[in-house]
Image (tube, rainbow, N blue to C red):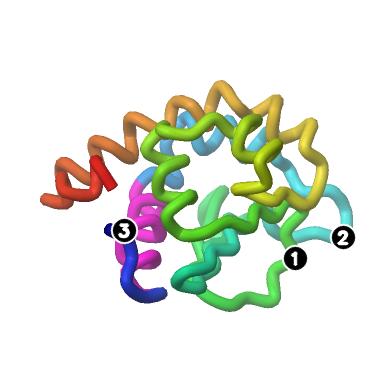
Amino acid sequence: MAAFNNEQEIYDLIGDFFEEIKDSEPVKEMMETLEPDDGYDAYCQFIYSNPDGKITFQQGENTPVEVICGETDARAALKFTQSADIGHQFWLGQLNLQETLARQQIVAEGPLAKVLKAMPQIEQIHPMYRDYLKNTGKEELLSV
């Protein structure tokens, strides 16, 4: 069973989750590590397929981090392309980033050294995602 049937479901689940945690310490610390270089105005972008969707973490006007669901003109220093199901499994903590990169289940574009440096914060987000699914009544997605 696929976790997502359409683009809006990606935004309603992963996008809303990111929106909820964007001011958390793990995300703040992760964004400090992923600080975009000159010429970029977004920290990172997740590009999903099956269904297609795009979620971008950008420097906010009034907040340190802004989550943008859908198309944007923001230029992200780091881009991660993957199927929506792989993205869901990754945030659940079911997949190891280094293994998914090696298997090209996630294709990364940009300075990977920054990503590897941010791994401790990324790993703190996995239980937050599982808790989010439980707290929003989407427990069935814990085993997808």
Q: Distance between the residues labelled 3 and 1?
A: 28 Å
Rendering coords of residue 25 (x, y %): 46, 30
Res 76 → quadrant: bottom right
Res 111 → quadrant: top right
Badge 2 vs badge 1, beta-carbon distance below 8 Å: yes
* Nearest-to-viewer mark from 2 and 3: 3
* Nearest-to-viewer mark from 3 and 1: 3
Name the kind of residue labelled 3 in the image: Ala
Residue 84 sits above or below residue 95 on the image: below
Residue at the spot of label 1: 75
Which sits earlier in the primary sequence, circle 2 or circle 3?
3
Main SS of the magenta part reads helix
Badge 3 vs badge 1, beta-carbon distance below 8 Å: no
Q: Which mark is residue 39?
A: 2
Q: Which mark is residue 3?
A: 3
Res 57 → quadrant: bottom right
Left-right relation of 62 to 108: left
Tag 2: Cα neighbours inside 10 Å, few (<14), some, or many (≥20)? Answer: few
- Magenta residues, as a range? 8-20
